[in-house]
Image (tube, rainbow, N blue to C red):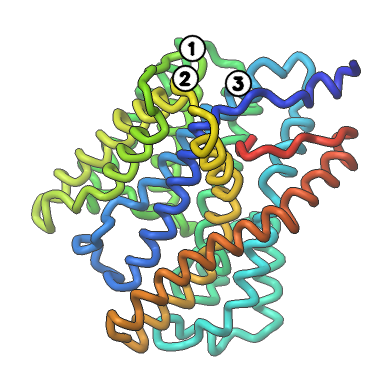
Amino acid sequence: MSQQSALMQPKAHYEILDGLRGVAAMAVVLFHILEAFHFGNAFTHPFNHGYLAVDFFFLLSGFVVAYAYDDRWSRMTTWEFYKRRLIRLQPMVVMGNIIGALFFYLQAGPSFPLIATTPVWKLVVVMLVGCTMIPLLPSMDIRGWQEMHPLDGPAWSLFFEYVANILYALGLRKVSNKVLSVLVVLSAGLLVHLLVLGPRGDVIGGWTINGEQLHIGFARLLFPFLAGMLLMRMGRRIHVRGAFLWCSLLLLAAFGIPRIGGHHHLWMNGIYEAFAIIVIFPVIVAMGAGGNVRGGLEEKVCRFLGAISYPLYITHYALIYTYTAWVIDRKPPLAQSAPMGVLLFVVAIAIAYACLKLYDEPVRRWLSARYLGVREAVGSSKV
């Protein structure tokens, strides 16, 4: 067996962690659908902490990247690592921006006043830049939300994911567990400082290129990613029966906790979010990594959820932009908006699955054969 073939041999998946990624992705879609009815008011959202799914993704990413690559560096160059990560992530970044561009002018209205004044050439430029993951400055905004990726809002977290992968390849992979533990503690302090002493009491943000938002983005990235790496390296596992069910319930409960403390005690909500990210999420990952699927339906569910998790996360927001504009501008009665929200959820999953099977997997196989010299096994885990 050649060195490249040995390098490319896929490792066993943590099926439950794959499934939990899908649960979290669906939670993000649900959060965004409900957000249309509580836009600008984080205190009344019925699925209040759904945005913490992003922080959970970062934790899973640190765990999975360390698991997949820590022991491969004697046979792999930094550039080979970058190629593998680009092949895994970039095709759906391109698709997310294309879908966002196709839906863009359907979202014109009072909610997004800049859309009506955006010429097609500027839309195309923004789409092409978005396909490269280069973040846009607020001066290039075409929507009004000052997003670094205004055609595909969730891509901001992929920008930070890329930053984490670069940091991992350049140095984090080399640090000892003792040094990594110190970094985890320091990054936890940065997160707690943002949440408890910051002006908001939550981690909402990270999608704009300015000082405040970059502070939030890096605080959200560093602890989960580093903690995920450390959790994998230390081999901490929690063994429980029915781990996937219990982990899913715990995760959804953490997302569904109402806003704590109100307008006058923001620090109370900050304490909860810090506890969720620093304690609850690592426990869930340790349980998921220590559990086993029981075969049959549970295994199929985990594989399906893991497979669509990334396509769902990166493509659903074009529908959310459109739905949000409709709800805010038209103010439809619940009898109309609720069925449309359910339909959006189903359509988002269908689009994600179609993108996975008709585009993402074939493109990744071709890119792997072309640039890695092998026919890579395309699995559900985001490695």
In this view of the protein, which residue sits in the foreground, 299 or 256?
A: 299
Q: Quadrant of the C terminus?
A: top right
Toward which corner of the image does residue 330 lie, by quadrant? bottom left
Question: How far across and down, in percent of the image, does residue 65 sit?
Answer: 59, 29
Disc 2 from disc 3: Cα separation = 11 Å
Left or right of 77: which side holds 2?
Answer: right
Left or right of 262: which side holds 354?
Answer: right
Q: Assign a secondary structure to mark 3.
A: helix
Up-down: is 179 above or below 361? above
Nearest to the eye among marks 2 and 1: give it.
Answer: 2
Question: Which residue ends up furthest to the left in the rendered image?
Answer: 264
First in sequence, mark 2 or 3: give its number: 3
In this view of the protein, which residue sits in the foreground, 220 or 343?
A: 343
Q: Assign a secondary structure to mark 2.
A: helix
Q: Quadrant of the N terminus?
A: top right
Q: Which label number is shown at residue 173?
A: 3
Q: Evaluate whether residue 137 shows in this view.
A: no
Q: Evaluate whether residue 195 shows in this view.
A: yes
Mark 2 vs 1: CB contact within 8 A: yes
> Going 23% across and 52% down the picture, which residue do you hit?
199
First in sequence, mark 2 or 1: give its number: 1
Question: How far across and down, in percent of the image, does residue 318 sit?
Answer: 54, 70
Disc 2 from disc 1: Cα separation = 7 Å
In this view of the protein, which residue sits in the foreground, 266 or 103?
A: 103
Q: Which label number is shown at residue 167?
A: none
Mark 1 vs 3: CB contact within 8 A: no
Amino acid bearing label 3: Arg
User: Which residue, given by chain and number where applicable, does mark 2 sit on?
Assistant: 230
Amino acid bearing label 1: Asn
> Going 74% across and 48% down the picture, which residue do you hit?
361
User: Which residue, given by chain and number where applicable, does mark 1 sit on?
Assistant: 177
Amino acid bearing label 2: Leu
